[in-house]
């Protein structure tokens, strides 16, 4: 996709138009990150020129929509750093969970952003006043607790970060501008996210999940399991323990920090939860995610835990049941698909030449000359865009 139509005439291809936004950092921003950072800063500054070559007014709020593992924290910190340096903005970073706040602060210091910012809980009753509010996991921005924060802080600028900026309760998120770039499938193809295999099992229950895991623990490796209810989590844990596999259930009341540290370090191989690990849980050595039957937003959040790359795990795995409302392959095509049929895995392999075939088809379509029906063409009062270009 050609983004140059959305940027000011001074933008030069893939070059970084805002060198101060990422200068001096211990990272090399990816091309799509540079595009997104540039657009967000220009939107906030009133310097954004749209595809019609019109300069748009300053945006009070901007949403960055980008997949899990694409570096939303890096992009958010880059934008905050630039605006803090240029305008002297005080910055607040708000999140629903404390681990998200800790991750943002660690990234801020480790990467050399050094943004002076307040860490704010989404449920804070007396938040500090700041000029710019960065909302992590901004799909929660329509919640009543966030509405209270906005009314109390009244920031000049709001930057939202989300992989899934839509809600099941159909409440609308209110941002002046939304920036989207490459999705999960494109980032996998470009090598920024891990490739994966997709598995479909007949049904999803504690008994079924435990059966498939214990039958082939070496296949699944380090695994994350999702269920709807706590009793399902506990039932699966007991079944795994009976088969000799250590697993722990993570909830808001368990010693989560210790559990995650032990899981990441390999002290046990299976982590079970309901929804608490759908956001902000980063573990590149995670190999498999069993996704409970859910809609699009929750499925993307659950499956997204597996896409961070790891040198020793070239292919990650997502397991769903055939009755799930949103198979992950609707979001990103898997290298291979496996379906459990008649007591064994049946493979549905993707044609490796599919991309080349698709590209050839696009070129054929682009070269095809199509004429309008005579009845329609007789009533046209002005030439089509491509005809105007040819006339020039």
Image (spheres, grey):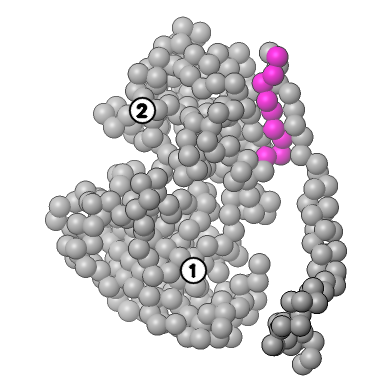
* Point 14% across, 56% down: residue: 126
Closer to the camera in the image, 115 or 213: 213
* Point 82% across, 53% down: residue: 356
Question: Residue 326, image x and y in percent?
Answer: 54, 38
Q: Are marks 1 and 2 in contact (CB under 8 Å)?
A: no
Q: Residue furthest top?
A: 242
* Point 39% across, 21% down: residue: 233
Is 30 contained in the magenta span?
Answer: no
Query: Which residue is under mark 1?
Result: 37
Question: Residue 70, image x and y in percent?
Answer: 53, 53
Is 336 contained in the magenta span?
Answer: yes
Q: In what quadrant of the picture does the N terminus appear?
A: bottom right
Q: Earlier in the sequence, mark 1 or mark 2?
A: 1
Q: In the displayed structure, does residue 160 sit left or right of residue 374? A: left
Query: Does residue 136 appear anywhere in the picture?
Result: no
Query: Which residue is under mark 2?
Result: 250
Dot label at residue 103 = none
Label 2 residue SS: strand
* Point 83% across, 52% down: residue: 357
Q: Is residue 119 above or below residue 387?
A: above
Q: Residue furthest front?
A: 375
Closer to the camera in the image, 372 or 70: 372
* Whole-number angstrom distance, CA of label 1 to CA of label 2: 35 Å
Crowdedness near tag 2: few (<14), some (14–19) or many (≥20) residues, C-alpha within 10 Å: many
Crowdedness near tag 1: few (<14), some (14–19) or many (≥20) residues, C-alpha within 10 Å: many
Question: Residue 201, image x and y in percent?
Answer: 60, 23
Q: Is residue 98 above or below residue 358?
A: above
- For the magenta stretch, what is the residue range? 334-342
Question: Residue 203, image x and y in percent?
Answer: 55, 21
């Amino acid at each position: 996709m050609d983004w140059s139509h959305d940027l000011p005439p001074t933008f030069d291809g893939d070059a970084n138009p805002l060198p101060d936004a990422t200068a001096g950092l211990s990272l090399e921003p990816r091309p799509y990150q540079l595009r997104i950072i540039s657009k967000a800063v220009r939107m906030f500054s009133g310097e954004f020129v749209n595809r019609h070559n019109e300069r748009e007014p300053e945006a009070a709020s901007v949403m960055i929509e980008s997949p899990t593992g694409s570096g939303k924290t890096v992009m958010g910190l880059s934008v905050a750093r630039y605006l803090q340096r240029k305008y002297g903005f005080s910055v607040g970073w708000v999140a629903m969970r404390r681990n998200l706040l800790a991750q943002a602060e660690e990234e801020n210091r480790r990467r050399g952003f050094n943004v002076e910012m307040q860490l704010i809980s989404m449920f804070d009753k007396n938040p500090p006043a700041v000029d710019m509010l960065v909302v992590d996991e901004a799909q929660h921005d329509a919640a009543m607790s966030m509405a209270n924060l906005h009314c109390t802080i009244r920031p000049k600028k709001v930057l939202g970060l989300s992989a899934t900026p839509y809600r099941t309760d159909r409440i609308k998120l209110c941002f002046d501008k939304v920036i989207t770039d490459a999705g999960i499938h494109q980032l996998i193809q470009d090598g920024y996210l891990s490739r994966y295999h997709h598995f479909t099992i007949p049904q999803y229950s504690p008994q079924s999940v435990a059966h498939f895991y214990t039958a082939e623990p070496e296949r699944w490796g380090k695994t994350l399991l999702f269920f709807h209810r706590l009793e399902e989590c506990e039932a699966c844990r007991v079944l795994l323990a009976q088969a000799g596999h250590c697993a722990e259930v993570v909830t808001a009341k368990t010693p989560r920090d210790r559990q995650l540290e032990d899981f990441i370090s390999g002290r046990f191989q299976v982590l079970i939860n309901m929804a608490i690990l759908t956001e902000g849980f980063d573990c590149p050595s995670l190999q498999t995610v069993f996704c409970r039957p859910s809609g699009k937003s929750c499925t993307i959040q659950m499956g997204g835990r597996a896409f961070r790359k790891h040198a020793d795990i070239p292919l990650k795995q997502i397991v769903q049941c055939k009755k799930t409302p949103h198979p992950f392959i609707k979001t990103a095509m898997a290298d291979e698909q496996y379906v459990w049929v008649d007591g064994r895995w049946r493979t549905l392999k993707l044609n490796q030449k599919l991309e080349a075939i698709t590209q050839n088809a696009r070129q054929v379509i682009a070269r095809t000359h199509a004429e309008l029906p005579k009845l329609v063409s007789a009533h046209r009062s002005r030439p089509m865009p491509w005809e105007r270009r040819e006339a020039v």
